[in-house]
Image: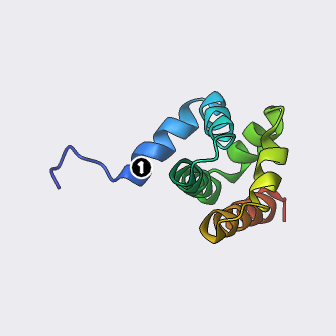
Amino acid sequence: MRATQRPLSLVVLAWGSQNPENVVLLIQLLELTDFYVRYHTINLLKLLGENQPKMLQASILESRVGVSRLVDLLDDQRELVRNGAHRCTGIYVDKAEPK
């Protein structure tokens, strides 16, 4: 890796942190039923949730359908999508709560 390249996770964190509307765009992608779109989108949300839990929580609550989209993924027929949604909602609840 060249010195000017950054790991993809850092690029995603920077992009997601710049504007909460970017997270809303990811949530809107969850409307699509394609496996790869849902799987990778949920992994991006999980990454943001692990590193920016308050920002992710605010963005999900700001979106009209944020919570319902995440809950809908728990009913997905594909196990990888379901498990990813479960991990994402777990991070969303655990890290966003004040201790």
Q: Name which quarter of the figure residue 89 lies in.
A: bottom right
In the image, 79 versus 93, the foreground residue is 79
In the image, 64 versus 2, the foreground residue is 64
Expressed as whole percent of the image width and height from the top left, the position of residue 24 reads 68, 34
Please tell me how many numbered marks the rendered image carries. Answer: 1
Q: Which residue is mark 1?
A: 10
The reply, left or right, for residue 35 in relation to residue 62 is left
Q: Quadrant of the N terminus?
A: bottom left
The amino acid type found where label 1 is placed reads Leu
The crowding category of the residue bearing disc 1, from other C-alpha atoms within 10 Å (few below 14, some 14 to 19, many at least 20), is few
Expressed as whole percent of the image width and height from the top left, the position of residue 17 reads 56, 38
Q: Is residue 61 above or below residue 85?
A: above
Q: Is residue 25 above or below residue 74?
A: above
Query: What is the secondary structure assignment of the residue under circle 1?
Result: helix
**Point 40% across, 44% down: residue:** 11
**Point 64% across, 47% down: residue:** 33
Question: Please, which colouring scheme is shown?
Answer: rainbow
Q: Name which quarter of the figure residue 50 lies in.
A: bottom right
In the image, 22 versus 42, the foreground residue is 42
**Point 69% across, 40% down: residue:** 31
Q: Quadrant of the C terminus?
A: bottom right
Q: Is residue 76 above or below residue 33?
A: below
